[in-house]
Image (cartoon, coloured by chain):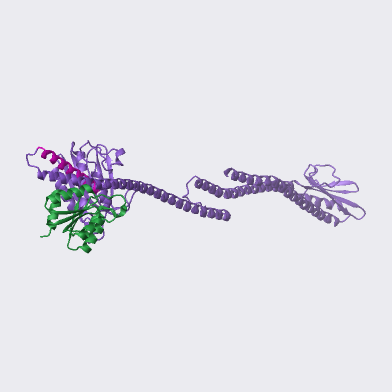
Chain colours: A purple, B green
């Protein structure tokens, strides 16, 4: 586009130049011809008029003393500066003024102006006398008129050259005035095309059409910027929705997976409990009937202990699966649970593990089963304690309100966040997706049932809460439970 | 002698409850499901009915409701094995343990025992509900 405009500009300049190459000589020769012709005519008329005046004076002279009286008149014509030469021919005899300065000895004919090489214009006028006719001959100087014509030509040439230069300058200025805003528009269009759509396209040119064109393009740019912004926002919203959707699908899959596990575990627990009833009751009944020194009493006691251990294990499994349908609902504060659990932990953990617990003042209440929340917190703390058991460290427990803006894991809303952080071994990334699975554990066999975090998840589900975990290997983990704030202040029981 | 009716579809549970309660001096009757349990109670009313919650066809809650309606004087102990699923054939949304326990309590059960309970727990509860 730039090359086209440049070519157009060059064409305009070339056209103006060619026009003046033709126009200036034509004007020059035309006007110069007119000036020369006019000057010659003026000169000739003056010459004839002067000659006529001299002839008139000569006609009034008396015939008897014509020659004597004619000479002073001829001298006067020369002395007046009008003539260079003056004589009078009577009967073939020439009587010349002694002041004559003739270039020709015998001028006999009139000359055409400027065409005889001596710059003297000769004119002859008949002078009637009584019995004859005399001829008055005068020679006028052409040089001043020729000089005047030359000067006029020079001035004309200068004027035409000035005109041509001015025309070229005006043409160049006009062309530049036209091209410059177009080039600015073109540069702006290139900027817009290359992505810089913020700068205005409005120009300051005085050309109305270009100004209007720029205004229309500016409207288009503004529309383009607006459309781009809308597209960008829509794309960002779409991306956000897709990301949230992906996260929700993952959460849903995780929830369904754990629900399936919970359902399976609940079913198995039900059957196990039915099996445990006769084991436990028969064993206890047998112990009742056995004497204290019976040999099998010790064995039966082992059976009872094993059954009781199985009962506790199944109780945890049921908490994991039953947390989802807990029927006990109260509105309560978390701080008393925090204090209770912390007091218990301080008695249980070794001195190498420091416990810091804090609850924000005036923390909102939450809705759920407080005994389950107690178990949730206890399990998280025990989990943290066990990860630091061989190395010591700080176990931090916090309860604080959070106005959460929402992200891929936790929806926007007001929460009470229960967080437990430890400085233990941390959890490897590959295991993070499985830590809530029942019986999943990275610890040694016999060191925990692998149900602690499953119970946490089950309880959190019953609270409508979300559990997140951040962990760095060899640095520690932070578990956060986002429990929705309850707005109702009354305590109620459902299904009681 | 206080008479106790045990209603449970799990034979092993029925057997052990029968044995322990008999040894504790109670007169024990047995029914394998809700329908036969209600028939037994109608034919020969017991002082205390120990009924499982999760049973096929007529479940424990329905048994308790019927007992409360027809035998308001009898004392009822509801027992449940926990878990989200009962025996096959139950609608999953209707058999969650906690929902059943809450429903049993609401229907009029005097006590609730969660399996696996121990001997002392069982006998203490039965003793507490026995007529003076």
Q: Would residue A455 be visible to someone looking at this image? A: no
Q: Looking at the picture, how far across and down is residue A9, in whole percent?
A: 61, 46
> In terms of secondary structure, what is the magenta stretch mainly?
helix
> Image point 20% across, 43% down: which residue?
A310
Q: Which residues lie in the magenta part?
A: A295-319
Quadrant where the N terminus of chain A sits is top right
Q: Is residue A389 magenta?
A: no
Foreground pick, A26 / A55: A26
Q: Looking at the picture, how far across and down is residue B11, in whole percent?
A: 22, 48
Quadrant where the C terminus of chain A sits is bottom left
Farthest front residue in view? B43
Horizontally, residue B18 falls left or right of residue A181, namely left
Within the image, what quadrant is residue A105 found in?
Answer: top right
Horizontally, residue A320 falls left or right of residue A283, namely right
> Image point 58% across, 50% down: which residue?
A178
Q: Would residue A217 be visible to someone looking at this image? A: yes
Q: Looking at the picture, how far across and down is residue A254, in whole percent?
A: 33, 46
Foreground pick, A403 / A17: A403
């Amino acid at each position: 586009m730039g090359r086209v405009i440049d070519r157009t500009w060059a064409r305009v300049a070339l056209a103006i130049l060619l026009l003046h190459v033709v126009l200036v000589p034509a004007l020059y020769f035309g006007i110069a011809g007119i000036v020369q012709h006019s000057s010659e005519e003026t000169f000739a008329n003056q010459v004839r008029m002067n000659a006529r005046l001299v002839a008139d004076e000569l006609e009034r002279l008396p015939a008897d003393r014509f020659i004597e009286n004619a000479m002073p008149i001829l001298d006067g014509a020369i002395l007046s500066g009008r003539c260079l030469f003056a004589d009078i021919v009577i009967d073939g005899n020439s009587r010349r003024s002694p002041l004559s300065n003739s270039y020709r000895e015998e001028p006999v004919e009139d000359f055409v102006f400027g065409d005889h090489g001596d710059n003297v214009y000769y004119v002859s006028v008949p002078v009637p006398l009584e019995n004859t006719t005399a001829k008055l001959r005068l020679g006028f100087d052409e040089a001043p008129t020729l000089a005047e014509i030359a000067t006029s030509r020079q001035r004309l040439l200068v004027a035409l050259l000035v005109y041509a230069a001015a025309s070229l300058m005006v043409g160049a200025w006009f062309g530049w005035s036209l091209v410059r805003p177009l080039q600015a528009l073109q540069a702006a269009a290139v900027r817009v095309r290359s992505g810089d759509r913020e700068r205005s396209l409005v120009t300051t040119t005085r050309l109305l059409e270009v100004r209007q064109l720029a205004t229309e393009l500016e409207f288009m740019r503004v529309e383009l910027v607006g459309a781009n912004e809308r597209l960008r926002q829509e794309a960002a919203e779409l991306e956000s929705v897709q990301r949230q959707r992906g996260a929700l699908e993952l959460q849903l899959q995780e929830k369904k997976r754990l629900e399936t596990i919970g359902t399976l575990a609940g079913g198995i627990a039900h059957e196990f409990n039915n099996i445990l009833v006769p084991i436990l009751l028969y064993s206890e009944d047998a112990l009742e009937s056995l004497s204290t020194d019976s040999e099998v009493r010790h064995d039966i006691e082992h059976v009872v202990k094993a059954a009781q251990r199985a009962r506790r294990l199944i109780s945890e499994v049921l908490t994991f699966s039953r947390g989802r349908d807990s029927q006990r609902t109260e509105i309560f504060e978390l701080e008393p649970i925090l204090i209770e659990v912390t007091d218990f932990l301080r008695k249980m953990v070794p001195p190498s593990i420091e416990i810091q617990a804090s609850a924000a003042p005036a923390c909102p209440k939450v809705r759920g089963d407080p005994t389950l929340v107690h178990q949730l917190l206890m399990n998280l703390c025990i989990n943290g304690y066990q990860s630091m058991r061989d190395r010591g460290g700080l176990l931090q427990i916090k309860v604080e309100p959070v106005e959460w803006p929402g992200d891929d894991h936790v929806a926007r809303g007001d929460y009470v966040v229960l967080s437990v952080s430890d400085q233990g071994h941390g959890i490897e990334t590959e295991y993070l997706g499985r830590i809530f699975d029942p019986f999943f554990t990275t610890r040694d066999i016999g060191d925990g049932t692998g149900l602690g975090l499953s119970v946490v998840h089950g309880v959190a589900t019953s609270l409508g809460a979300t559990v997140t975990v951040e962990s760095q290997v060899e640095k520690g983990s932070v578990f956060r439970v986002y429990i929705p704030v309850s707005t109702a202040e009354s305590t109620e029981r459902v299904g009681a | 002698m206080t008479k106790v009716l045990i209603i449970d579809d799990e034979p092993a549970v029925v057997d052990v409850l029968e044995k322990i309660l008999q040894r504790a001096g109670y007169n024990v009757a047995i029914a394998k499901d809700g329908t036969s349990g209600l028939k037994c109670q109608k034919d020969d009313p017991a002082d205390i009915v120990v009924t499982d919650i999760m049973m096929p066809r007529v479940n424990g809650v329905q048994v308790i409701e019927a007992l409360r309606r027809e035998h308001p004087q009898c004392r009822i102990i509801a027992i449940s094995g926990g878990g989200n699923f009962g025996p096959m054939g139950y609608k999953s949304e209707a058999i969650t343990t906690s929902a059943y326990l809450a429903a049993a309590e609401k229907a009029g059960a005097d006590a609730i025992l969660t399996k696996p309970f121990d001997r002392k727990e069982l006998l203490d509860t039965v003793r507490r509900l026995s007529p003076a």
